[in-house]
Amino acid sequence: GAVVSQHPSRVICKSGTSVKIECRSLDFQATTMFWYRQFPKKSLMLMATSNEGSKATYEQGVEKDKFLINHASLTLSTLTVTSAHPEDSSFYICSASPGTGDTEAFFGQGTRLTVV
Amino acid sequence: GNSVTQMEGPVTLSEEAFLTINCTYTATGYPSLFWYVQYPGEGLQLLLKATKADDKGSNKGFEATYRKETTSFHLEKGSVQVSDSAVYFCALNPAGKSTFGDGTTLTVKP
């Protein structure tokens, strides 16, 4: 199956700093990628849809100035958590699909962000 | 909009017991349905899928049948193992955007 790679898998940062998470589709091109956030013992909540060459679409309640998304190429989307605070600590997962329409999504390994 | 309702957990079973995790969905049309598994500290792995009504997805002893009439996709396994302990998510992915159930934590005790 298609492979989506996410990096880093774990990161610890200090409050007030910014952290960038990368999501790459390794063997297919993806015009659209998705970013999810998972709180402990909770389900995954869609944060935003990353669109290659255009602005991301954010879900209601997600601060776009806090979570900057860039989709500069057909194989790479990045999520930058700006001015991170402890409440931003969470598990972030990206996904992408090689096709459009009703199709299987392939997920990255996830990134555990801890803000201290 | 789309939604997925999943059996609440946690579920604790003894090894070799029978497992059922219920999942029902609301969606426009008849989207493909998926079960994902998440082991502690890891991302999501596709467990099985079904793309149309009456399809049965299966993998590693797990099965789920796409029931259009009841809008359900219940996950079953005849004999669970300790290694099956994980969180299971039912989902649908129209246009790649995933809608998940709340997840069911399964713990299998020896």
Image (cartoon, helix red, strand yellow):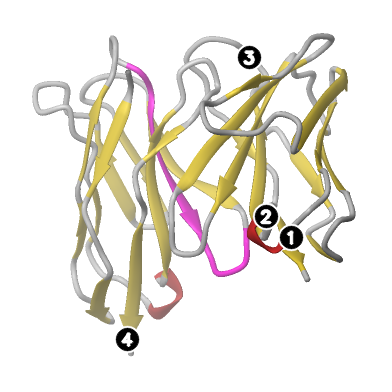
Q: Check residue A113 in the rendering and tell me which mark sits there, or answer none.
A: 1
Q: Is residue B29 above or below residue B92?
A: above
Provide the residue designation for mark 3.
A99
Task: List the single residue furthest toward the left.
Answer: B69
Q: Nearer the viewer, mark 2 or mark 1?
A: 2
Bounds of the magenta span? Answer: B31-42
Q: Amino acid at mark 3?
A: Gly
Q: CA distance from mark 2 to mark 1?
A: 8 Å
Q: Nearer the viewer, mark 1 or mark 3?
A: 1
Marked residue chain, label 1: A
**Element type where label 2 sits in the image:** helix
Provide the residue designation for mark 4.
B109
Q: Check residue B25 in the rendering and tell me which mark sits there, or answer none.
A: none
Q: Residue at x 86, y 66 (%)?
A: A14
In primary-sequence order, the first of circles 1 and 3 is 3
Q: Check residue A88 in the rendering and tell me which mark sits there, or answer none.
A: 2
Both marks 2 and 1 on one chain: yes
Q: Are marks 2 and 1 in contact (CB under 8 Å)?
A: yes
